[in-house]
Image (tube, rainbow, N blue to C red):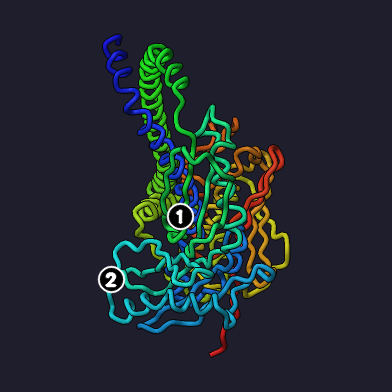
Amino acid sequence: MLALQVRWLAQLQRASAAAAGAALENYLESVATEVLYFYATGAERSLNIPTSTFTQDRLESLGSYYRKMDLEGAKHLFVVRIAEGTLGPVLFFLPESSAMAPAPPSEASRAVVVACAPWVLVSGKGVEIDAPRLTVEERDPENRIILNPITDRSSRVVGVAGIVIDGAYFRSRLLPAAIRRSLPRYFQGVPLGDVAVTVRDGTGAVAFSTGVAAPEGLEAGRSLSFVFTDWRISVRGPAPASEQWARASVAFNAALLALTALVLAGGIVLTLRTASRQVALSRMKSEFLSNVSHELRTPLASIRAFGELLQMGRAASPEKAREYGDYIESESRRLTQLIENILDFSRIESGRKSYEFETGDVGAVLEDVLRSFDVRLRQAGMNVERKDPWEAPAWARIDKAAMAQVFHNLLDNALKYSGESKVISVALRKEGGGVLVTVIDRGIGIPEEEVRRIFDRFHRVSTGLVHDVRGSGLGLAIVDHVIRAHGGTVSVESEPGQGSAFTVRLPGEERQNA
């Protein structure tokens, strides 16, 4: 350690200027990275639109989706469909009405058309895009655009989703905040008045400045990345003082020892965290296998028992035989649904889950699922209460099999967690151009801190009753995926001890007469 210190002191003077320059470079990298992260993450979050929205011409339904985004720094959010090398109308999101509407003639709409032109050419030539990425168009400095090309299963471009960046927001809020936020972190012990940051736009004009530093200081500069790449940011700071290096040399030994201890402690913490994660993963797998095994055994045992009763001639009358058959059919449906949940989860995880949408009556699908629950409800001494008069038919664009699975999973949850209550309420209604289905139980309810995680895979509510009720932890995760694929939403209202109400909202559709 002493030899290292002597060598370090000999090189200290030569390295001091380089170290100070590196600090300036690191500061500039931090500012540029913060700007990149802001726009890249916002674009990733808001522009990943399902392919079916474009191929099935449901772009107008994106209004409710964008309303929830509440994206800062965007002048316009837009989508445009591309079919066989032809650019469709540009649709802008209108925040005041939460609707998608054709873009009026403007500099922004013209910039969007120019930005989409290369993708129209790619579509017309039938070029396949294996892994589309975010691109940026900055030919119009007043309307810089982030685009995300949308491809279908054959990797052909079918549309573009994009953001027209709000330049005023970037100049007056985002950039100044990023510059000021990083200054104390990279210039500790240096008066911030001695550090000057200057930003120049594409024309060379000063767009932002924190002040003027001493001319004898060190300076570094760079261009921004991702967006505003023609803008340049520079920083000038004081040269390192000899007193600072003297204090650093005195503290070097202590710092080296502390660093060694810190590295050792960090290694121990990382090892313990890795072991903890492996234990948690192993426990999750064991619980999943145990729960699924129990879920499989329960209907199989019922099927076998009633089958043996029929085989031994214990059915004294045709009515009794029909009753046993009803039990066998009900448990078979329950077993089939569990297996379907597991298979669907596998398809979702691998990205192979697909849907066949058609105009269908949501109420009819719900009625079929309710009929399949008749035997289980009688076994449990429960009944279903229809809260509101059902408006029939309630048309929507749905995959009937997937929607039946959604209703089955919600009713299955309500049945499992109803506790001492013997009533499950189901409501179907039309509201605001959509179709709403609500399943209500009056059972154990869900703690407020767990409501946000209720749709996560494998998550099960940590109440006392959950240890007495088995489940795979996949049902609600599949419900959430299916409903989002339909362009809808699923929400839950719950209070511990009072029960839960799950509401599915689907975009409604007027059936066209033949």
30 displayed left or right of 101: left
Q: Is residue 260 above or below residue 87?
A: above
Q: Residue furthest top?
A: 2
Tell me residue 373's x, y (percent): 55, 55
Which of the pair 54/417 is nearer the observer?
54
Q: Nearer the viewer, mark 1 or mark 2?
A: 1
Quarter-of-image position of residue 172: bottom right
Task: Decide which of tag 1 and tag 2 comes sooner along the chain.
Answer: 2
Residue that mark 1 sits on: 232
Tell me residue 42's x, y (percent): 51, 56
Q: Amino acid at mark 1?
A: Arg
Query: In the drawing, what numbered circle is on residue 306?
Result: none
Q: Amino acid at mark 2?
A: Glu
Q: CA distance from mark 1 to mark 2?
A: 36 Å
Q: Residue furthest bottom?
A: 514
Tell me residue 338's x, y (percent): 43, 49
254 displayed left or right of 406: left
315 displayed left or right of 442: left
* Residue 318 in view (yes/no): no
User: Circle 1 — which element?
Assistant: strand
Instruction: Check if mark 1's residue and mark 2's residue have beta carbons within 8 Å.
Output: no
At a point 68% along the width and 54% down the height, the residue shown is 425
At a point 41% along the width and 41% down the height, the residue shown is 25
Tell me residue 43's x, y (percent): 48, 59
281 displayed left or right of 318: left
Which of the pair 146/355 is nearer the observer?
146
Residue that mark 2 sits on: 128
* Residue 39 in view (yes/no): yes
Q: Residues within 10 Å of mark 1 (few under 14, many from 20)?
A: some
Which of the pair 292/88 is nearer the observer?
88
